[in-house]
Image (cartoon, rainbow, N blue to C red):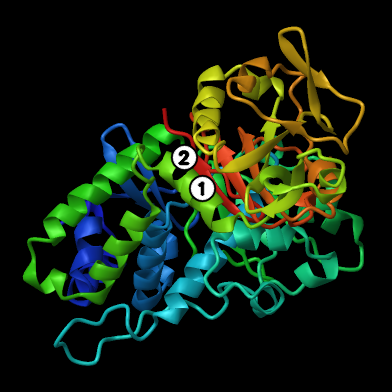
């Protein structure tokens, strides 16, 4: 039994006992955590304390909920951890909308597996995994407009941010509740803050009514009638807590693999594969990923002069000159973020350009720089400075990365690159950046694009399009 079993409410105890018969794997997870009653939150929350991982629960909420809803909620909370969701605000993100997107993805995952989640190989017809109909899933409009059927929460978040207010109005979640620092974590620009947008519209209900809870910082959701939805409180977690929870998952998997009944569970097999696929790639593989993606996506060619085909214009006068010939020497454009936060990491630049330089025999590499704007560089002494001609490319040569210096105070804007400079281009685009891009949501899609992200970034970078790989030193 869980460490906190002696103080469990009858309803929570009954729920955990019933869950053992439904899924050994989910039960092993909740046996590995402390289950503790707390009046400081309104539903339940998974968190990490100094002693380990804890499931906090509000007794009144649990006692008025039915057992099937509670089982669904416990699975829901586990799946947030499995999907590597980090319930904290990221720079420039609305924490309420971020957590709504995460819940939509998890609820969609559960509903798509409602009849199969508890199935076992060779077992009878399994019980259904139930969650209340009122809980929001990924909107049908998202799939219709994007074509994405298995989105990450970041995909849904970006889609929600871009929706006009009238489309947000019918999302069945009207309120968020959080700790005192909600305002510090929210987007300041009203155009991209649904809560601020709602305040300006007196003809409809607010989307984000903020309540404060001093002792439990996080977010819960309410329905139109003000009732707390059974989604669990989303806590803000730092990296230390995340690592501890990852270690807990490894212990649970180790225990579950020894149980023959558990090994037959569909949930166990599917979740184990999902967790492995979401872990970071081997640190030695990022270089191969960069080169293989460039090789796969590059397709442009160029004209050059070769003595293998003489110039007929001069040949009649007795001059043997090289002629113009179309060859398959492909061109790629490499864009470097030269903001202050990026160029102070010369090891990252050296590592990234080390891979690029391995491709110089096969590709022509045009170098472009971005800080507060886009420019083609030219050498001046021991550094690159902006040239006056954006139309004339700079051909990268070995060691040129050493001339990269910052030109701005650190703010990076990429709209001029994607929305203007790359118009009419078709070559492979490689972007070397730390990922802290002010106008990421405003970029015009360009394909193919590979984002090469600097090491040491505190949170994962989710590209608005294209692929991304993180430098590993």
Residue 431 in the image: x percent, y percent?
Answer: 65, 40
Residue 285 vertical placement versus 26 (above, below): above
Q: Which mark is residue 237?
A: 2
Q: Is residue 57 left or right of residue 464?
A: left
Which residue is at the front of the view, 54 or 155? 155
Total tally of numbered discs in the picture? 2
Secondary structure of the residue carrying numbered label 1:
loop
Residue 210 in the image: x percent, y percent?
Answer: 70, 50
Q: Residue at x 64, y 35 (%)?
A: 181
Q: Residue at x 87, y 48 (%)?
A: 313
Residue 99 in the image: x percent, y percent?
Answer: 58, 55
Q: Residue at x 78, y 65 (%)?
A: 163
Q: Residue at x 60, y 67 (%)?
A: 227
Secondary structure of the residue carrying numbered label 2:
loop
Residue with the mark numbered 1: 87
Residue 319 vertical placement versus 149 (above, below): above
């Amino acid at each position: 039994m869980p460490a906190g079993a002696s103080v469990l409410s009858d309803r929570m105890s009954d729920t955990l006992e019933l869950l053992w018969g439904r899924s050994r794997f989910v039960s092993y997870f909740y046996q590995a955590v402390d289950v503790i009653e707390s009046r400081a939150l309104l539903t339940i929350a998974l968190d990490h304390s100094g002693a380990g991982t804890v499931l906090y629960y509000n007794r009144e909420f649990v006692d008025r909920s039915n057992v099937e809803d509670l089982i669904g909620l416990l699975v829901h909370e586990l799946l947030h951890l499995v999907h590597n969701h980090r319930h904290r605000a990221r720079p420039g993100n609305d924490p309420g909308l971020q957590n709504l997107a995460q819940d939509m993805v998890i609820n969609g995952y559960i509903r798509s597996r409602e009849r199969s989640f508890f199935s076992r190989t060779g077992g009878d017809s399994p019980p259904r995994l139930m969650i209340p109909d009122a809980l929001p899933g990924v909107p049908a409009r998202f799939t219709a407009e994007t074509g994405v059927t298995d989105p990450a929460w970041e995909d849904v978040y970006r889609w929600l941010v871009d929706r006009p207010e009238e489309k947000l109005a019918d999302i069945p979640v009207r309120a968020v509740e959080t700790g005192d620092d909600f305002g510090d974590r929210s987007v300041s620009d009203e155009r991209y803050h649904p809560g601020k947008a709602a305040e300006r519209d007196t003809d409809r209900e607010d989307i984000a009514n903020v309540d404060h809870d001093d002792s439990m910082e996080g977010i819960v959701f309410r329905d139109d009638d003000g009732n707390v939805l059974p989604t669990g409180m989303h806590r803000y977690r730092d990296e230390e807590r995340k690592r501890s929870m990852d270690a807990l998952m490894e212990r649970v998997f180790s225990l579950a693999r020894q149980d023959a009944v558990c090994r037959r569970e569909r949930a166990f097999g599917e979740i184990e594969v999902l967790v492995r696929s979401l872990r970071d790639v081997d640190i030695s593989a990022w270089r191969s990923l960069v080169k293989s993606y460039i090789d796969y996506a590059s397709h442009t060619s160029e004209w050059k002069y070769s003595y293998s085909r003489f110039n007929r214009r001069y040949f009649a006068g007795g001059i043997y000159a090289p002629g113009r010939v179309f060859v398959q020497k492909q061109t790629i454009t490499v864009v470097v973020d030269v903001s202050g936060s990026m160029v102070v990491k010369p090891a990252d630049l050296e590592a990234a350009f080390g891979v690029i330089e391995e491709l110089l025999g096969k590709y022509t590499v045009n170098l472009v720089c971005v800080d507060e704007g886009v420019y083609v560089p030219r050498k001046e002494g021991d550094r690159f400075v902006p040239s006056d001609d954006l139309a004339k490319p700079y051909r990268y040569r070995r060691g040129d990365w050493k001339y990269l210096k910052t030109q701005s105070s650190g703010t990076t804007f990429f709209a001029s690159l994607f929305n203007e400079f790359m118009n009419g281009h078709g070559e492979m685009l490689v972007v070397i950046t730390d990922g802290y891009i002010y106008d990421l949501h405003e970029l015009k899609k360009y394909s193919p694009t590979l984002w090469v992200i600097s090491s040491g970034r505190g949170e994962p970078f989710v590209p608005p399009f294209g692929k991304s790989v993180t430098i590993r030193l």
